[in-house]
Amino acid sequence: MPLGSSSNQQDLQSELAGLLGRARRHHSPCGGGQIVWHEWSAAGSAALPLVLLHGGSGSWTHWLRNIDTLVATGRRVLVPDLPGFGDSALPPDGRDADAMPDVLEQGLQQLIGQAPCDLVGFSFGAMVAALLSQQHAHRVARLVLIAPPGLGCPAIEPIRPRAWRHLQTSAQRLAAHTHNLREIMLHHEASITALACQLQQLNAERDRLPHRRLSRTDRAAQALLQVRCPVHVLYGEQDRYYLGQTQKIEAVLRGCPGFVQMRAIADAGHWVQFERPEPFHAALLAMLDRDTP
């Protein structure tokens, strides 16, 4: 999708092109189309593959500020565009998180065989990761959920995203996406840069699953009751979905057999790995390096 001709738009294109230039692109079957995967890896890595699942109305670019740091630790990093988002085809059966695990497992079989991986999911991708860990338990060595929904704990504070699909011009849509970035994703006004807004627009306008509903249920919590691998949870301290809810959410998680810890990243909103990458990396890597309890 064209991003226009401003210097900021060119900067975003350049940053994306730089990461893509260092990636290997893979494809796996997805109904009548394909899932697009990107892989970054350090030479000679012996660590478990690290699979990152992006959030709703997103793509692999939700991890834009994290990939290089994770690869530098020696990881083989695999990041799909989830079915129905980014460059990937619609899921073959269903239009919500429960349509994702089997087709993702098929792709992982192709890419890493029977090897286990460490699985990290953000927001909608965290719910997908919980379901995948439930349904394909052999696949996941450690599970890290970043601001997971689907725990039966809806936000207390009203969150009012702005509709944009009816808007006629790119400028009007960009204004709506900027509002939604402020309303949902980021805590600090300074974080809502032109690049962040353009990235939000790029991703949201390729979202072909607009009527997802499972995040409003307890589907992830029910799945986690059957997950035995270590489960860690990270969230932004100022995440509006979590404000006033952390004790209730942690109580739900403590009923899950694999739960290890729930940790907040200070001074961050929902898209914590973008807004506060340095403390996010420190927390995530500590969780991934932790021995199995």
Image (cartoon, grey):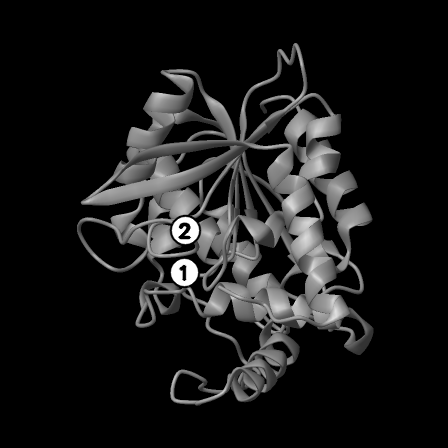
The correct choice, above or below, for 81 with respect to 44 in the image is below
Residue at x 74% of width, y 59% of height: 11
Q: How many marks?
A: 2
Q: Neighbour class for label 2 at 10 Å: few (<14), some, many (≥20)?
A: some
The mark nearer the N terminus, 1 or 2, is: 2
Q: Which residue is mark 2?
A: 87
Q: Report the residue marked by disc 1.
A: 150
Q: Position of residue 122 (x, y in %)?
A: 54, 52
Whether residue 138 is visible to the viewer of this picture, yes or no, is: no
Residue 185 sits in which quadrant? bottom right
* Residue type at numbered disc 2: Asp
Q: Residue furthest front?
A: 5
Task: Give the side of residue 81 with respect to residue 231, left or right.
Answer: left
Q: Is residue 15 left or right of residue 199?
A: right
Residue at position x 81%, y 47% in the image: 278
**What is the distance, in whole Å, between disc 1 and disc 2 at their CAs?**
25 Å
Q: Nearer the viewer, mark 1 or mark 2?
A: 2
Q: Is residue 270 visible?
A: yes
Q: Position of residue 95 (x, y in %)?
A: 25, 60
Q: Is residue 253 above or below residue 232?
A: below
Name the one closer to the observer, 251 or 108.
108
Q: Residues within 10 Å of mark 1 (few under 14, many from 20)?
A: many
What amino acid does circle 1 point to?
Gly
Would you identify the image quadrant in which residue 276 lies? bottom right
The secondary element bearing badge 1 is classed as loop
